Image (cartoon, rainbow, N blue to C red):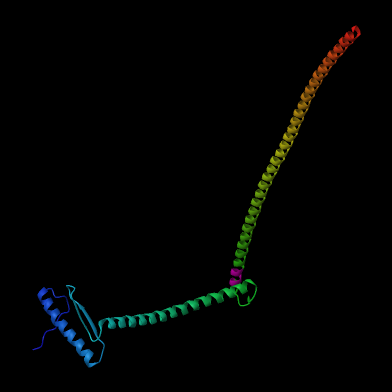
Amino acid sequence: MGRGRVVLERIENKINRQVTFSKRRSGLLKKAFELSVLCDAEVGLIIFSSRGKLFQYSSTDINKIIERYRQCRYHKSHAGDLELESQNSYQEFLKLRAKYESLERTQRHFQGEELEPLSFKELQSLEKQLDITLALTRQHQMKKLVARADELREKVNKLEDLNKQLQSKEKDEFSGLILDHSNCIQLRATQADQFESGTTLNTWYELIQHHEIASKEKEIDTRTEGSQSSHNKNSGWL
């Protein structure tokens, strides 16, 4: 009599769950060993129990197997990403190419070329687009002219302010020159007055000295004359 079918679900009984884990873990490790020996395969098996305990098996160094696994996964994912990216790039290229051709065709229509295949409605739509484009162009040109006028007006105001500053500076310098010239004239006049007053005092001093010298000389002459007269008298008596 065969064994009944096992339902694949979590075993609620803790003991039964632990026993099942031990049995199936041993069987899995045995199968991995048999696979590596029989088929000359490089096998790496890592198992963590519900308690976090590690069980592992590897036909060679487990680190080398993990590194090889990472490289393989990276190349595959990278190749897949490149293929997907190339497909997306091609789709984007087709969209851009169609848009470019449409813009070129519209530009030729704006320039009055290849208008024969267009219908009456398409021509009306083209006319409306031209009117809108012309209005936008005039509006943009007007904005530029206004901005340029404001810029020139600002430059004129700056130049006027600079001219006023230069004129004020020139007036201040001219006033300073006049003041220096007047001060120089006053200084020269003061020096002349001082020189004249000094000369007058010297002249008076010289006159007084001369008068004193003359008085002394007159007195000496008077004394000399008196002594001579007395001498003559005495000599006459003798």
Q: Residue at x 61, y 71 (%)?
A: 123
As rendered, which of 60 and 132 lies closer to the eye? 60
Residue 123: within the magenta? yes
Quadrant placement of the N terminus: bottom left
Residue 215's place in the image compared with 176, above or below, is above
Residue 200's place in the image compared with 28, above or below, is above
As rendered, which of 207 and 51 lies closer to the eye? 207
Q: Residue at x 44, y 78 (%)?
A: 88
Can you give x and y, in whole percent of width and height, for residue 150 in the image? 63, 53
Q: Residue furthest top?
A: 237
User: Visible in this render: residue 144?
Assistant: yes
As rendered, which of 189 and 172 lies closer to the eye? 189
**Left-right relation of 74 to 19:** right
Can you give x and y, in whole percent of width and height, for residue 184 in the image? 73, 35
As rendered, which of 57 and 237 lies closer to the eye? 237
Question: Which SS does the magenta portion mostly show?
Answer: helix
Quadrant placement of the C terminus: top right
Quadrant of the rendered image containing residue 100: bottom right
User: Visible in this render: residue 13?
Assistant: no
Bounds of the magenta segment: 121-126
Can you give x and y, in whole percent of width and height, for residue 74 in the image? 35, 80
**Left-right relation of 220 to 158:** right
Number of numbered discs overlaid on the protein picture: 0
Residue 27's place in the image compared with 12, above or below, is below
